[in-house]
Image (spheres, coloured by chain):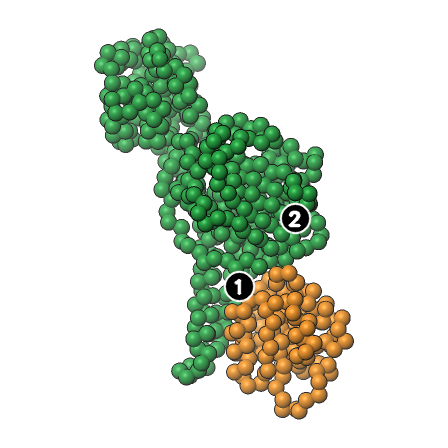
Amino acid sequence: MADPAATTPAHGAPAPANGSVANGQAALAGPAPVRVLLVEDNPGDARLAKEYLAEQAYGLRSSVHWARTLDEATGELSLGETDIVLLDLSLPDCTGLATFAAVHKAAPHLPIIILSGQSDGELALQTVREGAQDHLSKNNLEPELISRAIRYAIERKAIIEQLRATQMLLIQAEKMESLGRLAAGVAHEVKNPLARIQLGLDYLRDGVDPDDPNLPVVYERIESAIVRADAIVREMVNFSSNRSLAASPTSLRQPVDNALMLVDHELKRRGISAHLEIPGDLPLLRIDSSKIEQVLINILLNSVHAIDETGEGHGRIEITAEAGPYRGASLETQDRTARRLRAGDTVVVVTLTDSGTGVAPDKVATVFDPFVTTKPTGVGTGLGLTVSRKIIELHGGTLTLKNREDGRRGACATITLPVDPQPDLAPVAPTPLEPTTPPIERP
Amino acid sequence: MTAPDREPHEKHRILLIDDEAEFTDLLRLNLQRTGRFEVAVVNDPARALHTAQVFQPDVVLLDIVMPGIDGGDVASSFRADPSLKDTPIILVSALVSNRESGDEELGHSGDKLVLGKPVKLEKLIKAIDQSLAGR
């Protein structure tokens, strides 16, 4: 599993959710009770819920911890001793969607069931779209209903977590495949600085004349070669590291520069030039830099391949970025994920445009489908764009690919990322500081 | 003999063609220090042919992977030039695997010697001497 935290017993499928659900019979002696955190400021509602749960309807044994405020709830969640949250959205210290967002953020792997009053039914629905498992009307609570909702919520959440872990494995597997394709080029990029170090050493070997005017140059060349080799190897290690999605405010330049460093050799040996047009005042993006880098490398390698196919050499790739209001999903992407972006949201639109062969008209509709590839056997798995789109979706954004619309031959990939995304399904953890890499000189 | 006539004790002319100036800087300093070579450097492969026509090197050290024009294109342009067609070319590239360049032995690609980066100066000079002797 990609994320070890996802497997702690607190939110793995607890024993009572398994097996016995179908007939409603639970072995009384066996499984530990489900640990319910009831977040409810009204003592009467809380008492009723507790009594219903005490009836062990649907064979559900539970232990209930009662929190009256958001503050108490997040404190309890931080102990990691909860299996499921029953949440009233109107609390003394927080109300509405913000209550859900705060609890979800405090325990992203826990199932949450919203307890809604008469007036906030629509709000409860909205929390389900944002990741709550279910919502129950407090006015219609019954022992059977609440117990069944808890069982199914735990099961559903466990399945979602499993799916998520599988997605992360797929993303990682695809990344390793990209790395394999880049390895020879990266080795070449490291051998060049090694060659400089060797020649520097050869120069110094026969004794150093302190008056030799060339000495500073020799020392500087050796040192810059070490810095360069270190930057490349470090970036390779960073890129290959198997981390779960961890977003933090990041400049778009970081993944762009890192991606270009790893594909530099692939571009250079084909005479392909890369041109960047990324404004310096672009807002920071809440992204997982290494995952976005993976997407960029994927698109860049596709472009390299498409430029190869033209047989003309001297290709060109342009990378632009621009911040602005979201203008809605384009027609090609009638994709359910586009709903996360709303018209007017501030987004950064990144485009990668190449001078390759473009996308064949009959392939435009299927390029994001798994195992669709136009590359020869052994060159691509056909998962690159599938995984890339998934990564962008996990960031609350969209990825589209189409042919250029400026009359020239070639393809244009567009990544749209929200500047201030809604609370995401993804667990959010601080990203360790990435080492900075020296800027690359583009031809 | 394609190089212009010269005194026997005159230095041999070596042309370095590699887009990495950091590499050619160090190689030039090393070769010059032996006192045996006169060295010219080209970092922009598009200018390689013209420089070679003027400089008339005895041996060319040529990188393979360069932006725009690769080493193969440069070598072809030399072979098509009457004044350079017999000039020995040594390929020096990080692309070369051990099997191609050998560990101690010098490798060959067609009529060209091949050295893999990183290369020791001693081995490089041995390759230059071998090329000079074979002209």
Q: Secondary structure at mark 2?
A: loop
Q: Residue at horizontal 31%, vertical 16%?
A: A61
Q: Quadrant of the N terminus of chain A?
A: top left
The circle drawn on residue A130 is: none
Nearest to the eye among marks 2 and 1: give it: 2
Q: Quadrant of the C terminus of chain A?
A: bottom right
Q: Residue B66's quadrant in the figure?
A: bottom right
Q: Which chain is orange?
A: B
Q: Nearer the viewer, residue A244 or B12?
A: B12
Q: Is residue A171 visible?
A: no
Q: Amino acid at mark 1?
A: Lys
Which residue is denoted by mark 2 in the rendering? Answer: A355
Chain on which label 1 sits: A
Report the label total.
2
Chain on which label 2 sits: A
Q: Colour of chain A?
A: green
Q: Residue A188's quadrant in the figure?
A: bottom right
**Rendered view: A12 above or below A230:** above
Q: Residue at horizontal 44%, vertical 23%?
A: A129
**Rendered view: A32 above or below B31:** above
Q: Residue A82: x and y, percent?
A: 30, 26
Q: Residue at horizontal 55%, vertical 67%?
A: B20
Q: Residues within 10 Å of mark 2 (few under 14, many from 20)?
A: many
Q: Residue A359: x and y, percent?
A: 67, 40
Q: Amino acid at mark 2?
A: Ser
Whichever of callouts 2 and 1 sits on the residue coming sooner in the sequence is 1
Q: Residue A178: x and y, percent?
A: 55, 47
Q: Nearer the viewer, residue A382 or A406?
A: A406
